Amino acid sequence: MLDKMMLRKTTVARQRVRVLTGMLAAVALMAGAGRAMAQGSSKIGPSAPVTYDNKYEIYGGANFMNFQAGQDLPNRMNMGGAEALGTYWLMPKLGLGAQWRGEWGTTPIHPNAFLKGRAGVSMNMILFGAQYRGPKNHYAAINYHAYAGPAFGNFTRSTGSVPPQYLPTLGLYTNRTAALVALGGSVDFNRSKNLAVRISPDLILEHFGTETRTFFAVSGGVIYRFGHR
């Protein structure tokens, strides 16, 4: 029994390392693209100087997140949705952020006598945290962030025909709220002083079950900077 527990912990740790490595590789790849843009022709990128002296930022975009809708389900699911982020920059490199993320998708379930195929799942997250502005130039900027907050999971979107006493046979979580953490970075490719395109990968830690699990998420969208600090 002890050997099995140690093997499981080792496997989970390796999965977390692989996810984090993939996220960092994505940030590094995007950073390299930003440097390549900076070294290219002066005709590429915004014409006006990008000073990063804005006081506020608003970001909106589409996202993708990997997830598992039940602790004992054999397969993970893919969710898609949107997110919005508002940031108040306290100083040139440090900003406070508030974020909403919404995700929707369908998941495999255990074989049962009531519901065939896949079940609909949705999640809404309200996260708070901070951004740290890293390397930047006229063409692009790299940011690092950490957000945490409640995630509201709806796992019975398509199970109305299943009697409540039989819902556990599907393998899904019950509808509940759990803690969620998003750790990651982003690359902003400047279109102008106030407008940029952002790509942002994340390592997601959630605790809907009896243990903390890790997943991968990535979003892409537009960021608008305004106000003078």
Image (cartoon, rainbow, N blue to C red):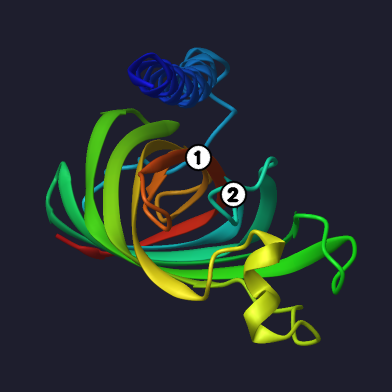
Q: Nearer the viewer, residue 37 or 209?
A: 209
Q: Amino acid at mark 1?
A: Phe
In the image, is 53 to the left or to the right of 24? left
Q: Nearer the viewer, residue 132 or 214?
A: 214
Please provide percent x and percent y for residue 64: 63, 49
Q: Is residue 204 visible?
A: yes
- Residue, x 49% and y 12% (percent of image)? 39
Q: Nearer the viewer, residue 25 or 14?
A: 14
- Residue, x 34% and y 28% (percent of image)? 137
- Residue, x 62% and y 68% (percent of image)? 168
- Location of the N terminus (image quadrant): top left
Please provide percent x and percent y for residue 72: 58, 47
Determine contact: label 1, label 2, CB under 8 Å.
yes
Secondary structure type for disc 2: loop
Q: Earlier in the sequence, mark 1 or mark 2?
A: 2
| Residue occupied by mark 1 | 215
| Residue occupied by mark 2 | 68
Relative vertical location of residue 207 with respect to residue 140 in this rendering, above or below: below
Q: Nearer the viewer, mark 1 or mark 2?
A: 2
Please provide percent x and percent y for residue 214: 44, 38
